[in-house]
């Protein structure tokens, strides 16, 4: 069996982590032969809850899990880790301004970025889930200058999976027959779910999604809104935010980093923009279509972009520029 992989999950006493840790522990993410050391970080008041999570991991009796480290100390949590899945963040409370939320999260992700810089392996792969995910990821990346920028990701796979699933439901096909949707931009309600390059297998024949759906009006309006508002719809129904589907999306994202994307397919991931691809401003963590091989991602370039898409991609980029600028002010004062 391979050397144990040291995997950190933050927000480990929370609801996403509760599903995620199980997925990781049973080998769904890093493989059925990959031994694991699970490191669980949460804040001090949650330590007794975390004790319960540790007991349950033990009770699962999963042989891949060689050790579980539960802590509220960043210097312990980030020590020599191979993977960091940063789920914990400051939640938005009633009456809280967006700016206050950003400020609280800049503090958390600056501190965790510095801990990555000091204690993690330089090869560490970092996935930021806690919202505002793109900007939190940017702050962590900026606070960890010794780790390659390419090692930082934010989660937009849940949006990607939602898009795939909605198209599959509409067409009455399995979701894995829908390929190459794209989520552009921010993991927020300005994100742009794009189906212009997506394909679907219908009656054994591969065709474009728009030819299969035959309803451009639905694709340009209802579909986009359903995906942009899906998180809010889940909260309204469940009185809690998406957790099972978020954990599945995190698992899909990390598995693709580890084992690569299937031939001929891409997935959506928030990665650093160098200013070249699709005229997205340099230095944003922006969701692009990416392909992965040997744990290295590349943006799928040269896809044709129509005027409708171009506008939507700009809108979400503008929101990210504003978030970045506000967060940067807080970064210097945090
Ligand atoms: P929960 O409130 O259930 O859990 C969050 C946990 O994080 C809590 O146990 C809390 O004590 C802990 N925490 C807070 N500050 C911390 C810190 N500085 N260090 C370590 N732990 C800390 O939230 P949950 O439903 O698990 O959601 C977690 C985050 O994921 C939220 O920010 C949420 O908005 C975000 N999401 C992001 C998604 C994405 O696609 N990017 C989708 C799902 C989810 O909405």
Image: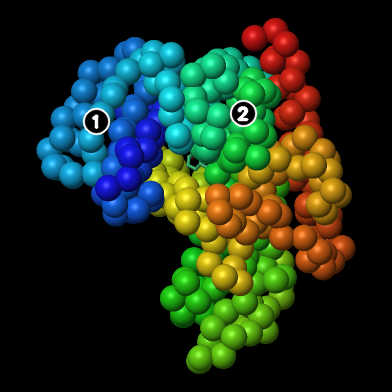
> Is 286 displayed left or right of 243 in the figure?
right
Q: What residue is drawn where x is 32% and y is 45%?
A: 2
Extreme-top residue of the structure:
333
**Front residue (pair 303, 239):** 303
Q: Is residue 66 visible?
A: yes
x, y percent for residue 167? 55, 71
Report whether residue 157 is seen: no
Q: Mark 1 packing: few (<14 Cα in 10 Å), some, or many (20+)?
A: some
Q: Earlier in the sequence, mark 1 or mark 2?
A: 1
Q: For the residue labelled by badge 1, is the local secondary structure a helix, a strand or a loop?
A: strand
According to the picture, the residue beneath numbered tag 2 turns out to be 147
- C-alpha separation, residue under disc 1 versus residue under disc 2: 26 Å
Q: Residues within 10 Å of mark 2 (few under 14, many from 20)?
A: many
Could you tell me which secondary element the residue under label 2 belongs to? Answer: loop
Tag 1 residue: 67
The x and y percentages for residue 114 are 57, 17
Residue 242 lies in quadrant: top left
């Amino acid at each position: 069996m391979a050397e144990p992989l040291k995997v950190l999950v933050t927000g480990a006493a929370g609801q996403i982590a509760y599903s995620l840790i199980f997925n990781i522990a049973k080998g769904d993410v890093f493989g059925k032969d990959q031994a694991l050391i699970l490191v669980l970080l949460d804040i001090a008041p949650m330590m007794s809850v975390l004790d319960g999570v540790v007991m349950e991991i033990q009770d699962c009796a999963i042989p891949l899990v060689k050790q579980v480290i539960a802590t509220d100390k960043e210097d312990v949590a980030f020590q020599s880790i191979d993977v960091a899945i940063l789920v914990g963040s400051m939640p938005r409370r009633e009456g809280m301004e967006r700016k206050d939320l950003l400020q609280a999260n800049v503090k958390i992700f600056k501190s965790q970025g510095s801990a990555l810089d000091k204690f993690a392996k330089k090869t560490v792969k970092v996935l930021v889930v806690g919202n505002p995910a793109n900007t939190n990821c940017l702050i962590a990346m900026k606070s960890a200058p010794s780790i390659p920028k390419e090692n930082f990701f934010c989660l937009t796979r849940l949006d990607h999976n939602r898009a795939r699933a909605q198209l599959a439901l509409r067409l009455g096909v399995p979701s894995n027959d829908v390929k190459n949707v794209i989520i552009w931009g921010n993991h927020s309600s300005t994100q742009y779910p794009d189906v212009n390059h997506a394909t679907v297998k219908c009656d054994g024949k591969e065709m474009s999604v728009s030819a299969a759906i035959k309803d451009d009006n639905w694709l340009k309006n209802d579909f986009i809104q359903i995906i942009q508002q899906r998180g809010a719809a889940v909260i309204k129904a469940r009185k809690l935010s998406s957790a099972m589907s978020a954990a599945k999306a995190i698992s899909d994202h990390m598995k693709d980093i580890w084992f690569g994307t299937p031939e001929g397919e891409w997935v959506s991931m928030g990665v650093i923009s160098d200013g070249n691809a699709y005229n997205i401003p340099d230095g944003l963590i922006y969701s692009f279509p990416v392909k992965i091989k040997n744990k290295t991602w590349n943006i799928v370039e040269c896809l044709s972009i129509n005027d409708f898409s171009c506008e939507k991609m700009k809108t979400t980029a503008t929101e990210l520029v504003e978030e970045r600028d506000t967060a940067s002010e807080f970064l210097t004062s945090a």
